Amino acid sequence: MAPASKTAALVEQAFGVEFNLVDGESGELVYASPDQPGADWQMRAELFREVARRGRPEFVEEEPPLVVLALPLAGADECVAVAIFVTRPVLPGDDVSQAARALGIDPEEALRWASRQTPWAPGSLERVGRLVIKQAAAGARIKELEEDTESLSVNLAATYEEISLLYRLTQNLKISQSDKDLGRVALEWMQEVVPAEGLAIQLLPVAGEDDSLTRGGRTHSVLLSFGRCPVDDEQFSRLAEHLNLRESSQPTVVNPPATQDDSWPFPQVEQLITVPLAEGRNVFGWLAAFNHVSGEEFGTVEASLLSSVGAILGIHSGNIELYRQQSELLAGVVRALTSAIDAKDPYTCGHSDRVARIAVRLAQELGCDQKLVDTIYLSGLLHDIGKIGIDDSVLRKPGKLSEEEYEHIKTHVRIGHRILVDLKKLDEVLPVVLYHHESWDGRGYPRRLAGEEIPLSARIVAVADSLDAMGSDRPYRERMPDEKIDDIFRSGAAKQWDAQVVDALLRARDDIREIMRDER
Ligand SMILES: [Fe+2]
């Protein structure tokens, strides 16, 4: 048996001889060094235990010229290194029998051994012993720190990945990002961090009907999945019901043996974590990790990461829902205002709605983005809101208007602007309300803007407005024939109207005539 530990090697290096090793707890010899005479160490077991307990170098026997030095070795060894030293030169004729007997060594063997040893001053032995113990303690501490650093850096790497994932998600929390898109991004990023074979998000239906804007509520659940997801949408719903997920705001973790039980209805799911996508009491769906990549159990680390992602997705879904409800409310308010305009001017009933839909078709033909299309729809509905402030007698007059009456009608654009100017949500509608009677050649009203000084949305609504006026019956005239309308637009392009909008109208005229027929 050889002393294997680093500390024992350190002792040998410092003193130039190999030490015996004694177990610090029992006091019994565990290694007998060939450099040392065979002494009776058993009788000193109690002393060695004491040395191990006190933790400093000690002479456990002093029988000149022999001394026994005991060094408690720190660290995992829990050993005491023990060695006999001579404290003065011993010659072949010397008598060491008393000291030898005290240590339980044959006197002749003791003399032979002692005469070959280099003598040490007891003070030096003690000092070197202390140094060795300090060095060993420092070594053990360094080892401990190295282990700590190693586990810390592993943890740090995992934490960094988690934080970076959560940060990237929060950067995507835009209201324009749909919950499905954000969910897909989250799943893709999570598979880098979560040791699961499959990940999934089930988004639940959102109450509410489609509104007249472009955003509608979701009428049935949707399952987004990444990797090897062992369930489909219908199975996920059953799983949610089986685990009673609706009742839990906490992560639900299911591992074997629960998943090996006969009562577990999803044998393809061996390990599972689910967390709700919730904001307050509203649950918008669930996020789930299926089957650990190495068959281990899912634990609190994975559950807490999923919870954080679930909370972010829940907040986003909550915001989207709030935005959708606000949009619905706004659409309701706009519909109410539109009805008010129509009630005021029964001859043009349905005009605002048709203008809105025609303007949307023109905007699409011109390649406008969805946000502008939405704005143009609202603008079409509200462009004549100022007519609420025009005298009924003028508005409903069947014949030709006098100069004065015409001037009065023209004020509807400014009145409309005043009505809506304080509604923050309708900011983008204002230019259309104010400028839908401007003319490309600068001869319109109220500000005689020309060309591209007139906002595009107002130029589009102007065309839609004129088209609907020409295409509708009036008390004093019948609707114009389509060919005549086309001719008027062709000749008015780049004069009254923006030529590119007129082109769009002529390109999309079949769709637009359909809209005009629908609404009558
Ligand atoms: Fe108008």
Image (cartoon, helix red, strand yellow):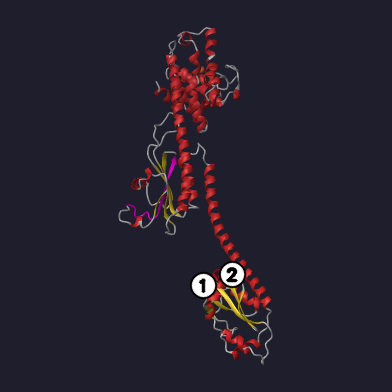
Is any atom of residue 473 visible in this view?
no
Amino acid type, mark 1: Glu
Residue 10 screen position, x and y as percent:
62, 74
On whether residue 273 falls in the magenta region, the answer is yes
Q: From the viewer's perspective, is residue 100 above or below residue 311?
A: below
Figure quadrant of residue 117: bottom right
Is 413 left, or right, of 520 in this rendering? right
Q: Are marks 2 and 1 in contact (CB under 8 Å)?
A: no
Figure quadrant of residue 6: bottom right
On whether residue 168 falls in the magenta region, the answer is no
Residue 25: which disc?
A: 1
Closest to the observer, 329 or 115: 115
Quarter of the rendering occupied by the C terminus: top left
Q: From the viewer's perspective, is residue 50 above or below residue 503?
A: below
Is 253 left, or right, of 376 in this rendering? left
Measured Cα–Cα span from mark 2 to mark 1? 13 Å
Q: Where does the magenta region start and end? A: 265-279
Q: Which residue position is annotated with label 2? A: 55
Residue 341 screen position, x and y as percent:
45, 17
How crowded is the residue under tag 1: few (<14 C-alpha within 10 Å), some, or many (20+)?
Answer: some
Q: From the viewer's perspective, is residue 285 above or below residue 372?
A: below
The residue at label 1 has a CB less than 8 Å from ligand 1: no
Is 121 left, or right, of 292 in this rendering? right
Element class at badge 1? loop
Element class at badge 2? loop
Closest to the observer, 295 or 105: 105
Amino acid type, mark 2: Gly
Residue 514 screen position, x and y as percent:
41, 25
Residue that extends furthest to the left in the rendered view of this protein: 262
